[in-house]
Amino acid sequence: MSAVHKNIVILISGSGSNMAAIVKAAERRHWGARYGVRVAAVISNKAGAAGLEFARQHQISTAVLDHKAYASRDDFDAALMTEIDQHDPVLVVLAGFMRILTPGFVAHYEGRLINIHPSLLPAFTGLNTHQRALDMGCKFTGATVHRVTTELDHGEILDQAVVPVLPGDTAQTLAERVLTQEHIMYPRAVERLLTQMV
Ligand code: GRF
């Protein structure tokens, strides 16, 4: 048993279902006792992000930084870094955080910044991944957990989940099938990183 002293910070913009899956895994699998790690804070760039309420209910500190309140991307990222660094995180987890991060931000968290992307990278970087997979006639798609580099949706692949594309799928049905797998894969990928840190 180790004392809880290492923090994870999760960044969200929306429903935060991946964040919730990580928080639940941390509780269920006793990350505090096993790895001395806790989810310390959830930070959103949108005040209405549904995941914030979930975080509060789980006694996790929350903060909102509205990117529209900042004059530039650099200003926003500087404020975000200040907020994140209050928790001195061992890991910063992007979970549906819909902002492109500046090179300075990425460099600051080098080695401790990860993301989940809803495609089998390197295919379909960027947005609308499920519709693009359908348009290309893909028979399989999925999701990828990767380290974050300055190039969007690149960086070392840490884990992938493969999902079949079924007849009659829409972007919506495909997104739901992929998301179910994301919720299994992302906590698993985070925990694997934690085992390498203890
Ligand atoms: C997920 O599909 C994730 O792969 C992508 O954005 C979505 C976030 O969903 N980056 P949620 O906010 O975790 O529910």
Image (cartoon, grey):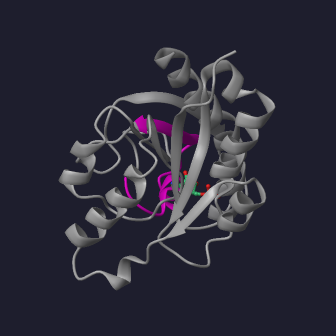
- Can residue 162 be seen here? no
Figure check: 180 above or below 49: above
State yes or no: residue 29 in magenta: no
**Closer to the camera in the image, 32 or 192:** 32
In the rendered view, does 183 fall on the left or right side of 105? right
State yes or no: residue 140 in magenta: yes
Figure check: 71 above or below 96: below
Expressed as whole percent of the image width and height from the top left, the position of residue 67 reads 37, 76
User: Residue 31's image quarter?
Assistant: top right
Name, please, the residue furthest toward the front. Answer: 3
Figure check: 121 above or below 179: above
Instruction: Look at 69% across and 44% down and name the residue there.
Output: 23
Instruction: Look at 64% across and 49% down and name the residue there.
Output: 18
Expressed as whole percent of the image width and height from the top left, the position of residue 143 reads 55, 41
Instruction: Look at 55% across and 17% down and name the residue there.
Output: 195
The N terminus, quarter of image: top right
User: Residue 188's image quarter?
Assistant: top right
**Closer to the camera in the image, 196 or 198:** 198
**Closer to the camera in the image, 196 or 85:** 85
User: Residue 176's image quarter?
Assistant: bottom right
Instruction: Look at 44% across and 34% down and name the residue there.
Output: 90
In the rendered view, does 49 fall on the left or right side of 137? right
Expressed as whole percent of the image width and height from the top left, the position of residue 104 reads 19, 52
Q: Which residues are magenta?
A: 125-146
Q: Ligand 1 is found in which quarter of the picture?
A: bottom right
- Can residue 103 be seen here? yes
**Closer to the camera in the image, 43 or 103:** 43
